[in-house]
Structure formats: C-alpha cells, structure tokens
Image (cartoon, rainbow, N blue to C red):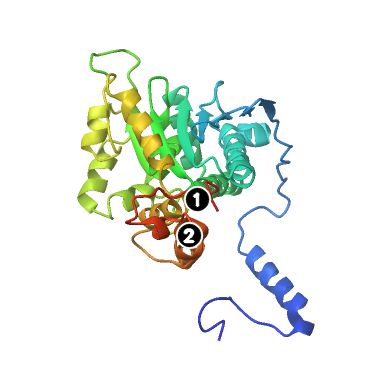
Amino acid sequence: RAVEWRLVDAIAKPGQFAETVRERALKLAALSDRPAGGKGVPLRPLQRRFEGDTVHYEHVSVAIDRANRTATFTVRAPATPQPRGIAQILELGDAWWPLRMGRELDDAILSLRINEPEIGTWLLETEGNTEAVLACDAALLQHKDHWFVREVTGLLRRALARLDVSSRTLFALIEPGSCFAGTLAELAFAADRSYMLRPAEPRADAPRLALSEANFGAYPMATGQSRLARRFYDDGNELSAARAASGRPLTAAEALALGLVTAAPDDIDWPDEIRLAIEERAAMSPDALTGLEANLRFGQQETMQTRIFGRLSAWQNWIFQRPNAVGEKGALKVYGKGDKARFDLGRV
C-alpha cells in the first residue's frame, strides 16, 4: 500500500534490501553524464569568524539583534572577477563564488534554525556589484549541462528552499549598495515581505533590482514553481512583463509597478515602516506566524513536499494544542477577557 500511495518508490524483503538498494543506485548512476574518470571537487571546511552576536563568512555575515529578536543576513557579491570558462571554474573549485556563497548561506540558515529559536525575524540584505552577480548567473546558464555546474545549481536551489521552509519571518531590505540581482534576487522573492527604498530625490546610489534567466525556473520551490510564478499565481501576463524587464537594473518605482516588491517607502518613511513591520511580527504568536507564513509561501500547487513542510510540520493540529494557544495565558484562553497573551517566543 505504501507504493500504491506513492509514499515510497519500492519495497524489498530484509534479506534482499541491500542488493535492491545497490541495483537501484547503479541504475541511476548509469543515467549520469558525468565522465567515469571525472575528478571530483573537494569541499574544504567553511571558515567562520565570531564577533559577539555576529558571525562572518567570506561572502555571508549574520548579525543578531537580541533586543528586537532579529537576525540580519548580508550576502555579498563576488569581490573579484569570476571565471566564465568551465576549465577555469573547475580549477577554482569550491572557491567559485556560487558554490562558496551557497554553502555559507546554507550553513548560516541551519545554524540559526538550530541555535537561535527565539530570533524570529530574519532580515535579508545583499551588498556589492550587481553586474558581478549577473555575470555568475550567465556562467551558470552557459554551462548548465556540465555535471559540476549542475551540482552547484542544485546546491543553490536547496539553500534557497531552506529559507522557504524555515519557520521564521523573512523580510528583504533593498537599500543603496545592495545587489538583489538574478540568483540573489531570489532572496527577495523568498521573503514574506520585500521593502525597496525609493529616494525622494534622485541619487546615484539609489537601489536597483535586476532579473536574470535564473529567476524563471532555475531554483524551483517545493511547489515545483519558480518564486516569481508563485508570486504571480502563474499569471502569464505578469510573468511576461517581468521577463521583458530581465537583464536591466530596475528602480524602486519600476519594481513596484511590476509587482516584484511588497512596498517602496521613501527616505522619510523607511525607518518607521521597517520598525513597525518588525515590531508587528514580534508581537504575534510565533506558532501562529509559522502556520500563517507557511500557508502564504505554499498556497497554490500541492506536492508531497508541501504536504510535509507546508502543512504537517508547519501547522497541522499542533499549533492549537500548544501553550501559546491553550495555555493559562494562551491566546485562546485570554480571548475576550481584556488580558494579554504570553507567548513562548521559540520558533519550532
């Protein structure tokens, strides 16, 4: 019945299990186009440096503000020119920016998920040269059929998917000096809200957002959709308009008109808009936010992954049985009594 319900791919008796797994693995390996004598790429340990509540990697840093229960992720564009040819990419190995950045982001996400459950809001920022990010995207696209580049693309997809299934509020802040372009623009599209500064007066360092081919299917979500397709409910007209704007830096007004960002406050409103958004989420039940945000992130196409991460583990039944809901000071217990609920601030 497990096979019939597609919960597993196959079943085997205990005495045949190891051989069945081996045969299955060899059959799948035979489908690979990786050369039999191909040389692997060693993944060296990531270098992390801690300074108080901040951790620094080469391309990623995370700063925790315990008073506001926020963590600010800053992902940096490559600081040096990156190779375009596959031979040079293989020579660079695990130091190639897409691979190193993806591993560091993945490590930072997992570290905060396990070690900082009460840091409920993650602020996503980027820093650096937009063109450098787009150049890496072009290399990923040009060599997408090469086994190594395919593995790197898969790693980036998984790192971004970890954001989707993280039980934390995600806000993207697009400010001067940012580089939300192509692959890094996926951070903004993964966020529950994205804010892009719209300067009241023209300025040379006004933030820009840029799309690349990577935003149209290279990193599918658990739903099987691109984040833009999810954002636009698979509306062909809106997706076509976004694709037409691909490859050029968009102002805040243009990004807002295309539906690529949630809001575009000006310089005067920016500090209060961001502060209120953070305080608003901090005042809510962490459990309720986990369910609410999962519903919004996975609200369309249903797959086995969304059933697990967007429904069962996100909210199914347990939210209504926890102390935040039915404890002595839970939200349901104090409702209508003029009292204030007291929440366990840990995200699960």
Measured as percent of width and height from the top left, residue 194 is found at 35, 37
- Left or right of 128: which side holds 104? right
- Left or right of 19: which side holds 121? left
Distance Cα–Cα, label 2 vs label 1: 8 Å
Front residue of 208 and 71: 71
Q: Quadrant of residue 190?
A: top left
Which amino acid type corresponds to the residue marked 1 in the rendered image?
A: Ser
Cβ atoms under marks 2 and 1 closer than 8 Å? yes
- The residue sitting at 52% across, 77% down in the picture is 6
Helix, strand or loop under label 1: loop
Measured as percent of width and height from the top left, residue 187 is found at 44, 39
- The residue sitting at 23% across, 52% down in the picture is 236
Question: Which mark, by number, is residue 314?
Answer: 2
Front residue of 150 and 201: 201
Measured as percent of width and height from the top left, residue 265 is found at 27, 27
| Residue highlighted by disc 1 | 167
- The residue sitting at 51% across, 27% down in the picture is 77
Q: Residues within 10 Å of mark 1 (few under 14, many from 20)?
A: many
Front residue of 292 and 99: 292
Q: Mark 2 or 1 closer to N-term?
A: 1
